[in-house]
Amino acid sequence: MHNVSRRAALRSAIAVALAPTLGSLVLPGLAPAAAGAESWTAKWIWAPSSATNQWVAFRRRFRLAAAPSEAVTRIAADSKYWLWVNGTLVVFEGGLKRGPNRTDTYYDEIDLAPYLDGGDNTIALLVWHFGKQGFSHHSSGKGGLLFQSDLRTGTTTSRLVSDTDWKHTVHPGYSHDTSGPQANFRLPESNIHYDARDATAMTGWRAPGFDDSGWTAPTDSGAAGSAPWNSLVRRPIPLFRHSGLKSYTNASVLPGTGQGSTPIPAGLPSNIQVTPYLKVDAPADAVIGMQTDHYDDGAGLSGIEPGTAYNVRSTYVCTGGVQEFESLGWMSGTAVRYTVPAGVTILELKYRESGYDTDFAGSFSSDDAFLDTLWSKAARTMYVNMRDNYMDCPTRERAQWWGDVVNQLKEGFYTFDTRSHALGAKAISQLAAWQETGGVLYSPMPSVIWTAELPVQMLASVWSFWTYYLHTGNADAVTGAYPAVKKYLNLWSLDGDGLVAHRAGDWDWEDWGSDIDARVLDNCWYYLALDTAAELADLSGDSGDVAGWRARQNSIKASFDRVLWNASGNEYRSPGYTRDTDDRANALAVVAGLAPASRHRAVTEVLRTHLNASPYMEFYVLEALYLMGAATVAEERMRNRFAAQVADPACHTLWELWDKAAGTDNHAWNGGPLYALSAYAAGVRPTRPGWTTYEVIPQTGTLTKIDTVTPTVKGDIRFGIRRDGTEVTLKLTSPSGTTARVGVPTYGGSRPVIKANGTTLFSGGSFTGGVSGLGRDGKDSSYVYFTVRPGTWTFTATGTGRLDNLALGRSVTSNNSLENGDWGRSRLTDGKLTSVNRAKGFTSNEFASADIGANPVWVEIDLGSDTDLDAVRLFPRTDTSAAGGGTAGFPVDFTLQARGDGSGTYTTVRTVTGQSNPEGAAQTYTLTPATGRYLRLRATRLGTPAADETTKYRLQLAEVRVG
């Protein structure tokens, strides 16, 4: 999110020695949980003193009579560790940033049996002590390692523990170099500085045969439970996955020698978390720098002081000869930039990818490449923001801002397998555990250097707890937070109007941007939080609290429209608010369920015409539009607002703000389209906790094909829908333990016939017949509903309406058209969405200039009868580009007008001024609600001429669709 100032010749560098390269994405298996409470006999050990950015190496040799069948090992480190067993890398970056609560420390658990042998064995660990605070780490102020392994062979169990029988040394290669730009204060990590000249004695130190006789016994820092680490909390998320060393995408063109001060950009396949590696033949004293292209990410954000957004970087000082090094502190970006002095021979540049252990199990695809790309970029943004905790961004802050987490939770349920759920449970637990004694909740946490309350983000957090339970069925994760929820919500009060009183907190922030109607937003967020509080109270066994929470909800609901609906503006607007209508506030009224259905058409118009929400709150604008059935408006907002991000070829992720330069370009709070498309366009959403029941009610808008996979705790839900003229086909594969409610869309067809697995179930407006495992669940003007048991179901509906394209095959008139073998009025509605020979579309005759306001060109489509008009899609000419590039002949200034059957009067239903060049993409325009038989496009300013006639301006389109 944001901060507003308030202000290893291996010769020996550590990862030279990063052991043999493992296969891609290696993750050691986690041991099952030990029965009962853990009994600790290990001692915390460290060097005699601690320092910031300190690296300490540990070794322990031991002998086993036979290879163990099990070796459940518990490891705690302050702050991170890398573990080798008998020379094999087993754990890459173990440990979690400290702070399950204000006092305690996480530990990892892993079974080391697969790596141990009968006879001699060697454990080696490298531990990195951060030694400073951050936005996601509570520093204890002291480095430490705690290791305990219960080794079972047959019926005998022995225990290996950390104590003064171990050997240690402060790694001489690493130092805390404070010269040059430093990692910003929000990060507990420091820059890595490794001097291979000082590390020659460490060559091969992780191998069993290494001579550690010069190492000394570590200092005993106390038993498990000792301060400053206190009680130990088992790591609630999987160990991080990691790959072997990989080649860069541009490896074939990387130089073979250093380029001096000119950085060498080594390309990555996406925006990912990496540790960079090098192998060089270099003279002693050569200094190599490593950082990513995102090193100074987000420095342009308002409120970020210059020089306070630097991420981590690495410096390697060479010893003479062939040597290799991997910088173990992860970075993120789309390229690693190596600065290699001239005279250095580059033998290899590679990287290792690591990250949260989950797979991209969810998917979304459609017939619209734009929306597919948008979904995919949102998914990639999600993953790069997962590691120790959910992060706002993986660069500037790496912080668990809870406003971001609320959005990330919803996106993650449709993106990753269920291992990702643990990160959400951890976030909930931490938020509650870090509550201040007076009841205030704050984020990011764990942190003691930021403790400011952002009130509406905390309300959003509370609301999201029930969302988490609905998707996971994990009651323990949310009921444990109820006391904190109760304490926090009781800090809020109602005012004389029966609405919630504004709470400024420490940072009175509702969203980035301006035109924010805080009173409407406050009441929506509090109402949503109250709903979760009532549900959690009942789930937690505190049913006596339910009535109080519901009473507050009822008070807000009773007063909301009376006080906050502005009848003259036909919008939600609080008294005294004088700025532009707030799309966020109107959207959240719908999401909260406070806006009655009678207001939906007006609110839809607000959301079509007002664009104040930042990418963070755009999440809720899109959700509101789908909740109101305005799928085409939602699509239009996505296509318009996300156009630059989808078109950006250099960026695999989504931006913090609409202006890329104004923030980071990898902010997961911007993933609203992912959720909207999966949960609403595909329509797959849980209705009872843990997906025991769920619904599939697609809102396809202008899409004619959707395929989606939704990963759930019950298994994958696979759903697809196809629209072909007046026929619709839906296919659902539903997992065991579920009941699905399927809405088969009729698209306004008057007498649809619906079959399930070949059997007719609905005809002539009524249900008929039956299929085992399927039930009837009513109908409305848009859908016929069925409930289905687990299995594969295929529904076909014939005789549905053609709301996808009312204009198809309809007659077209115009006051100015060129008619020949390629162009003509009838080509505008022939169903061909691209320009091809003998069917290029519509073109007017030529004009000398773009400005034709004195003689506008119009084309009019006769839809056959009066019908509700929702949206128009204009498909540009595609056979020839415009002079200078882009699309030729697309109108710049125009209106869309409707005329009823028998009427002589046209009503303007959309005015477009300054339309940017569509660059070959279809453009969707939602309309002011209207009914009409005739739809006219009237152009007063034309776009760039075609490249083959650079002085001739024309109105040119391949196709028009009306919905």
Image: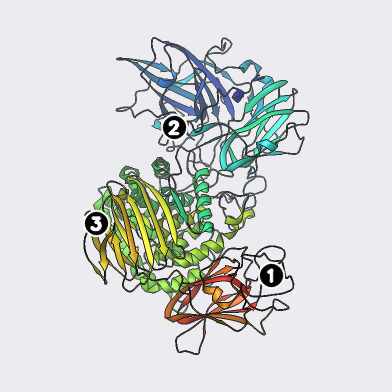
Q: The residue under label 3 is which amino acid type?
A: Leu
Residue situated in front as seen by the camera: 573 or 15? 15
Residue situated in front as seen by the camera: 612 or 893? 893
Q: Residues within 10 Å of mark 1 (few under 14, many from 20)?
A: many
What is the x, y in percent for residue 616? 51, 56
Q: Is residue 655 above or below residue 356?
A: below
Q: Is residue 146 above or below residue 783?
A: above
Q: Is residue 361 left or right of residue 18?
A: left
Disc assigned to residue 676: none
Q: The residue under label 2 is which amino acid type?
A: Thr
Q: Residues within 10 Å of mark 3 (few under 14, many from 20)?
A: some
Residue 184 in view, yes or no: no
Residue linked to disc 2: 105
What is the x, y in percent for residue 451? 50, 46
The residues tagged by marks 2 and 1 sit, at their Cα atoms, a distance apart of 64 Å
What is the x, y in percent for residue 753? 30, 67
Question: Could you tell which of marks 3 and 1 lies nearer the N-terminus?
Answer: 3
The residues tagged by marks 2 and 3 sit, at their Cα atoms, a distance apart of 51 Å
Q: Is residue 846 above or below residue 393?
A: below
- Tags 3 and 1 touching, CB below 8 Å: no
**Residue depicted at 40% across the width and 64% down the height:** 627
Q: Is residue 396 left or right of residue 91?
A: right
Residue linked to disc 1: 944
Q: Is residue 163 left or right of residue 875?
A: left
**Residue depicted at 65% across the width and 71% down the height:** 889
Q: Is residue 42 above or below residue 734?
A: above
Residue situated in front as seen by the camera: 920 or 274? 920
Disc assigned to residue 774: 3
Element type where label 2 sits in the image: strand
Q: The residue under label 1 is which amino acid type?
A: Thr
Question: Could you tell which of marks 2 and 3 lies nearer the N-terminus?
Answer: 2
